[in-house]
Amino acid sequence: MSSFSHELKEVRNSGNEVKSLKKIYAKLTPKEKDLLEAYSDGNDIIQQLDENYEKIRHWVDYSLTAIKKDKRKRGKLNFSTYVGTLGTTWAKIFKSRDISLLLEDNTKGQKYSFRAFEMDMDTIFTNLINNSFDSFDALKKVQERIISICLDIINDEIEITYADNGKGLSEIFQEKEEIFLPFTTSKKDRKGNDIGTGLGMYLVKNVVDDNNGEISILSPPQGFAIKLSFPIRKN
Amino acid sequence: MEKTYKIGYIDENDQTVKQFIRNLRPYGIEVIGYDFTKGMTPEALMEQVYASDIDLLMIDYKLAESNIVGFDGDQIEHLIYTNRPQFPHIIFTSDTQQAENHVEDWKIIFDKADVLFTDEDKDKTNRFINMLTRSIDQYRNLVDSKKNRLSALLSKGHEAGLNAAEKSEVLSLQDELNNLDSTKVIEVPKQMVSIENLESLEKTRKEAEEFLQSLIEKAR
């Protein structure tokens, strides 16, 4: 990915030219009636390109951020900043899926030190968010879709509660903790065959363990919720 | 080119619908989209489809993702398969793998990425267009052949009456046409083709002939 990041950046930057094209095209209203259909088609194409450019820009930015060297360096990680960036990064996708992200940060003003690889946190949240997407889709009904992330500092730990109001933990898991077993998935096709890798939550658990953290599945009245906690050093 | 085919395209993204309106227009195919309202049921969507008088239905697989409706293309496919089992329809999607996980008949799944409507992609596009138009023609021929035969039998029934085998054929054809489309009243009204009706017409004709004959005899 890093070998063609320059090209990706060029695509992202030049794609914006579609907005200039839109302005130029607006000045070219045809007088001949037989050209009106072609003109209208042109307008629709520009509109579609414009909307798709926004998606391309989002994914290019997402990919470029994911491969940043900083992400692979163990460093000081501030969760307030991290979840704020997470919200911005996923904003377009959340919007297209009609999902609201609620952030509740109760760590503001508290100084602490936590060292981790940002990439590890990406692994955790990408998997959780993707599971929420699947969970909303599996509901097969139209409802308000909410993902919430709450940050708290309790004693010498930072606690992150991630929740969604989707379908909730599948009944195939007899014990909640089974969700962390490798190759265990609730994603099935119409014949009941597994269609998920069953590695998502296994990876999440491993990353939490690697960072000396704890992970536990909660039992919300609706949807799915998980609590992560990591040891911190208070300043 | 004269438009001879009308295709309905179910996709909640109207930009994508417009794209296929443009792309299929040069092939003489008119594409129409449908209104999506928040929380609408698959049945409500299908009412629009049945009222739109189309020759073929294209269904995008991923419909529920954007939270406008709570169903995906497989549910629509199931409804069309139940109500119009032989009506031409395809799942047209960017995510064939997802569709394959949930749609029984893989033959009807087509990948949008395989049909790009570019000059470089002409062969694939032409194959896709041929598939669409042949499916439509095949269905039209099927319905027309049944309707023509039914029409011929009805004419004969009204003029000279039908024998037992022909009466049975009328009933079979009537059932077959009804089974092809359980969503609307068949083009030939049922009461017109009922055997009782045919028999009563035949009886009335005979009675009228006898009455006329008796009048002629009296006049003599």
Image (tube, coloured by chain):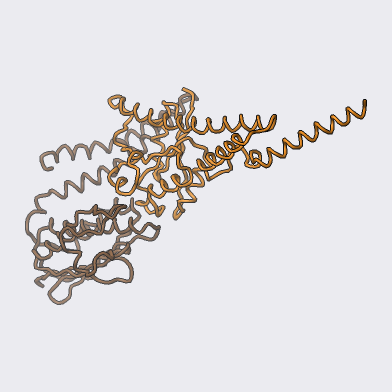
- A217, A103: nearer the viewer: A217
Q: Residue at x 49, y 43 (%)?
A: B49
Q: Is residue A8 visible?
A: yes
Using the image, determine if residue B174 lies above or below residue B37: above
Instruction: Please state the horizontal and vertical placement of residue A120, each as a whole percent of the image.
Output: 13, 58
Q: Residue at x 30, y 54 (%)?
A: A94
Using the image, determine if residue B64 lies above or below residue A104: above
Quarter residue A150 falls in? bottom left
Colour in which chain A is shown?
A: brown
Q: Is residue A108 visible?
A: no
| The chain in orange | B
Say whether residue A229 is left or right of residue B6: left
Instruction: Please state the horizontal and vertical placement of residue A215, each as a whole percent of the image.
Output: 17, 68
Instruction: Please state the horizontal and vertical placement of residue A23, each as a whole percent of the image.
Output: 36, 34
Say whether residue A151 is left or right of residue B164: left
Q: How many marks?
A: 0
Instruction: Please state the horizontal and vertical placement of residue B171, each as a whole percent of the image.
Output: 58, 40
